[in-house]
Amino acid sequence: MNKVRVCTLLWGLIPLVLLVVDWLLFPTVINGCRNAPQPTAETLHNNNVVRMGSLSGHEVFLSREHMGDSTYLNYLNNSRSGWSTYISSLTGGSNALAITIDLTDPAGAQLGALAQGVIMELQDVAPDENKKLSSIMGGSDPLPGAYRKINLQVPITTFSRFPVDTLYLVGISYDSSATEKEKSLAPVMQSIISASRPDRIRSIVLPCLAVRPGNPKALSFEDFFQLSLASLSRPSWWPRNLYFSLFSDWNDADLSHAVGAMNNAWNSNCKALARESVLYHEDSRLIFVGCSLAMVVSAFFVPPIWRNAASVFVLFVGSAFAVLETANKFLTGMDATGRLWIHFGIVAFLAALFPKLAHWNPKGVFES
C-alpha cells in the first residue's frame, strides 16, 4: 500500500473516530424514543415488568410489585446481563432504589410502607445494614426537598433476595403544596440521575415519589412522570435501566391512572424531543460524516502531509458549521424532517465541492 493510500485512509478515519467518541459519550442516534408497545394495566398485571422503550440511551420500564413478594426486585438480578448493557458492564455497575421519608411531622420522620419493608428485608439479608439504615432514618437528614445516598453492603450469599447496592433517601413534607413538591423534587431527580454516572449505577428503581392517590397535596401521577422523564433528556450510559415501580396493592382505578399517566408523559416527552431534530447532535454528526468524505477526496489533490489534513479538517468543519448556522436562521418553524434533508444536502454539497476548494488557487482569478 503506497503512501497516498495510507494517508487517504487515515485522513478519512479522523472525523469518524470523533463521531464514534461522540456516540460513546452520548449513546443515542435518533433524537426521540424507540417505543415498545404501550402497556396497559392488564399487561402490567400479567407480566409485572413491561418495557416502555429507549429514551436518550436509557431503557425505561414499568414494574408492578409488592415489597413482601419473594420475586421483589428479582428483575435487577437479570439486568446484570445482556447485550444492551455490554458497554456499561465493562466497567461494572450497581443497582439503586429510591425511597421517600415523610418529614411532615416536626416530631420526627414517618416511614412509609416501602421504607418499613426495606428495613424488614435488610433485617433478614443484612442485619448490620439494617441497624445502619434504621439509625439514619431516625434522624433529620435528608431535609425536605433533598436526598441522601446510602451505600449498602449486602452479603453476596443473600444479595439475590435484595439486589440493591445503593439507597437514595428522599425527604418529603406533605405540608407543602403539590406545586412546591414538584419544584423541589425536580432537582433531586436530576441529581440522582446525574450521580449515576460517577457512581456507576446501572439500574435505578424509582417508585412514585411523593405520590399519594387521593391526597391533594401530593404529586399527581402526571407531574411525577413528566419531571422524571425530563431528567433523562441527556443521553448517557448511566443509568442504563430505569424502572418506574407501581405498588400492586393500589386499587385498579389508581393503577390504571398511573399507567395512563406514564403513557401520556412518555408520548409528550418523545414528541418534544423529535420536534427539536431527527438526529441527536444532528449538525455535528452530519458534519463529521461529510468531513470524512471531503478529507478522503482531498488527499488526492493536496500533498499527503498531516499539516494539510489538519487544514482541511479545520476549514471544512468551520465552514460547515457557519453555513448550517446561517441556514438555520431561515429554517425556523420548519419540521425536523425537512431540516434534516436540508442539512444533509448542505453538508453533501460542501463535501463534494471541498476537494476543488482545497486545490483552488486564488491567483487564477486574476490571470488573463
Image (cartoon, grey):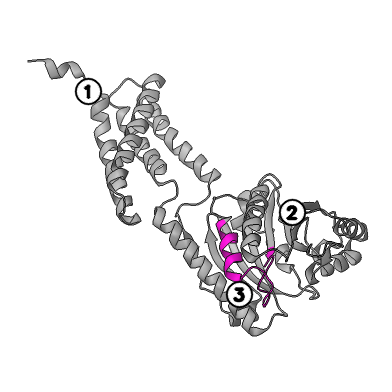
Q: Which mark is residue 147?
A: 2
Magenta-drawn stretch contains 207 = yes
At a point 27% along the width and 31% down the height, the residue shown is 354
Vertical side of 364 occupied by 257: above or below: below
Which quadrant holds the N terminus?
A: top left
Q: Report helix, strand or loop for mark 1.
A: loop
Q: Which mark is residue 360?
A: 1
Circles 3 and 2: CB distance less than 8 Å? no
Mark closer to the observer (2, 1): 2
Q: Report helix, strand or loop for mark 3.
A: helix
At a point 71% along the width and 78% down the height, the residue shown is 248
Mark 2 / mark 1, whichever is N-terminal? 2
Residue 295 position, x and y percent, is 35, 31
Mark 3 / mark 2, whichever is N-terminal? 2
Q: Report helix, strand or loop for mark 2.
A: strand
Q: Which residue is mark 3?
A: 258
Circle 1 residues within 10 Å: few <14, some 14–19, many ≥20: few
Label 3 vs label 2: CA separation? 24 Å
Label 2 vs label 1: CA separation? 61 Å
Residue 126 visible? The answer is yes
Front in this rendered view, residue 181 or 347: 181
Circle 3 residues within 10 Å: few <14, some 14–19, many ≥20: many
Residue 363 position, x and y percent, is 18, 15
- What residue type is disc 3 on? Ala
Q: Which residues are magenta?
A: 206-230
Residue 128 position, x and y percent, is 93, 57
At a point 60% along the width and 57% down the height, the residue shown is 83
At a point 38% along the width and 41% down the height, the residue shown is 289
Location of residue 105 by image quarter: bottom right
